[in-house]
Amino acid sequence: MSFADVLSKVNDFVWGPVMLVLLVGTGVFLTIRLKFLPWRNLGYALKQVFAKSEKSSSGGEGDITPFQSLMTALAATIGTGNIVGVATAMVLGGPGAIVWMWISALFGLSTKYGESVLAVKYRQKNDQGEMAGGPMYAMQNGFKHKGVGRFFAVAFALFAVLASFGIGNLTQGNSISGAVHTTFGIPTWVTGAVLTIAALLILVGGIQSIGRVCSVVVPFMAVLYFLAGLVVIVINIKNVPAGLSQIFGMAFNFEAMGGGVAGTVIANAMRWGVARGVFSNEAGLGSAPIAAAAAKTDHPSRQGYINMTGTFFDTIVVCSMTGLSIASSGMLGQIDPTTGEALTGANLTIAAFQTGLGTAGGWLVTIGITLFAFSTILGWEYYGEKSLEYLAGSSKLNKLYRVLFSLIVFVGATTQLQMVWDISDTFNGMMAIPNLICLLVLSNVIAKECFEYQDKVIKKR
């Protein structure tokens, strides 16, 4: 058995049914444990995101504003998965996969809330006076058995550092250079050089620089992509009812649940919808809480609710726009004339947008991939940096890591790295194992913080 075969089997397990059940199951457990407050308080959370106070400071210690913290987390979350991942899920799992993405996101609200609460509660200052937090600190400081907590913390931080170079760097640079070359004919080395220089200029400034850039780029790119998708849907409005019927019909055809081909269709919709949904919004992986820990906030729950909305924006808003654009375009199942196979990934999304916007549709998707993927590079650098800082016990390696991380962007942009994609998927998923254990072990701490803060939520409604 070759290394690639072994890697494929490991990856199938990491992102297979058992892990997906654990990810969604943890979300279900926390939703019930928290008496559905993350759902009930979603309106409050969205108001907090756009409140002027959150764009400056909520009081308390921290390095960046609550809004910048959310945008940094969203920068790493909203990426190629929102364009490529959704299209792939709809090809492999059918249109019904979109519904299961929505369902996983609803329970992911509670998971993301819980992660962020723990990150703020157990954060601490590093040797530079900056905030350092995330699942590794929650495990180290929150577990009663310190040896067990330290073991899981080191495992999480190690997987996060490895994932940062893969899913947060090499694969993103590869996606950008490939899309730009296909659409505009620009050589991959030129794109790689521009990305490397841009990354260096931003990342050398640390979290304050990342936060400032992301607070501008993320809202811009999300609104641009949302409006473009909305135009495509409106132009193809006559196909929307049939598209929605297909989406819900293939997700909930209960007559087929007994087995047979239709039963397999539903199983595939569940698997790929949940897998791509979790992969896109990262609820349960433990990455976003690292950004939450840097926020200036006076209570863990306040930032928990703000960061929770990242799952809503990523999956319910951005992924839905991709899915509905594809469903209403009539391009799902169409053959790609260049390969002779069904359109999938970015090519499917581009084809869908072109049905409404012509050539401009392809440009907009390419611009979307570029901005989404570049912002992912910025967000994941911070995750990797803080994880490395934890492993090293010092921030002395941070600047060296920032430079090395930026240079590796060029490698990703100029090299075909299919195996790196597979390895990245594996490390990305393995981060979830210690993080989910942490959420379950410290669920009582999350509940206490949630219920304690509820009076403030009621007063602000």
Image (cartoon, rainbow, N blue to C red):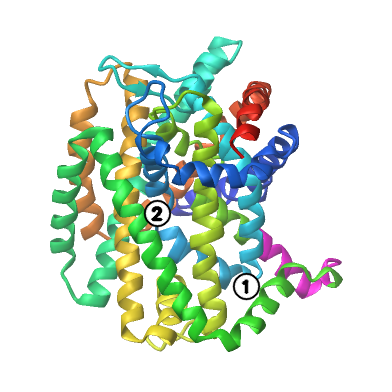
Q: Quadrant of residue 212?
A: top left
Question: At x 62% / y 55%, what residue is drawn?
Answer: 274
Range covered by the magenta-colored residues: 256-270
**Amino acid on which the number 2 mark rests in the picture:** Trp
Residue linked to disc 2:
421
Question: At x 31% / y 31%, what residue is drawn?
Answer: 385
- Is 261 colored magenta in this rendering? yes
Q: Quadrant of residue 405?
A: top left
Q: Which sits in the foreground, 407 or 309?
A: 309
Query: 459 left or right of 165?
Result: right
- The image shows residue 102, relative to residue 396, as above or below, that is below
**Amino acid on which the number 1 mark rests in the picture:** Pro
- Identify the image quadrant of the C terminus: top right
**At which x and y percent is residue 392?**
31, 19
Q: Residues within 10 Å of mark 2 (few under 14, many from 20)?
A: some
Question: At x 63% / y 40%, what residue is drawn?
Answer: 110
The reply to whether residue 170 is visible in this rendering is no
Residue linked to disc 1:
95
Main SS of the magenta part reads helix
